[in-house]
Amino acid sequence: MTEETPVEETAPEPQQPLLRVITPDATPEQVAAVVAVFAAMGGGGAPAPEKPRSEWASPARRMRTPIAHGRGAWRASALSR
């Protein structure tokens, strides 16, 4: 029938540390405060998606419709389109 080949699992490569404390007299509270600040900045992950633009903010809303010319134009200007 079908022959199965063993799949080799590779170990993930070791990553460089994201933060390295070079001051030997830093307390765990100080290190935790720095880590909390970096975590709050949100440096990792995908950027936030753009919000959909409101129709009220559309530049097309600022454009006027052309003024009708000719006979009955004043009447047509008040009619809805």
Image: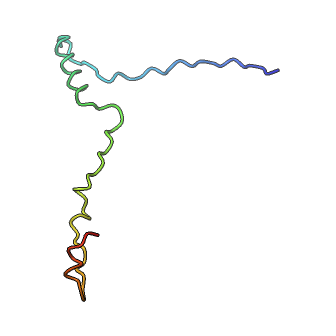
**Quarter of the image where one finds residue 41:** top left
Q: Residue at x 41, y 22 (%)?
A: 15
Q: Nearer the viewer, residue 18 or 33?
A: 33
Tell me where residue 50 appears, x and y as whole percent.
31, 45
Scheme of colours in the image: rainbow
Q: How many marks?
A: 0
Direction from residue 2 to residue 76 in the image, left or right = left
Please name whichever residue, 20 or 73, is drawn nearer the observer in this view of the structure.
73
Q: Quadrant of the C terminus?
A: bottom left
Occupied quadrant, residue 62 = bottom left
Query: Could you tell me which residue is drawn at 33 percent across and 31 percent down?
Result: 44
In the image shown, does 43 or 20 lie closer to the viewer?
Answer: 43
Where is residue 8? Give x, y as percent: 63, 18
**13 relative position to 74: left or right:** right
Front residue of this view, candidates 51 and 70: 70
Q: Is residue 76 above or below residue 19?
A: below
Which residue: 23% across, 83% down?
73
Provide residue 71's location: percent of width, then percent of height.
Answer: 24, 88
Residue 20 in picture, x, y percent from top left = 28, 20
Instruction: Identify which residue is drawn at 22% across, 56% down.
Output: 57
Residue 1 quadrant: top right
> In the picture provided, is 52 more to the left or to the right than 2?
left
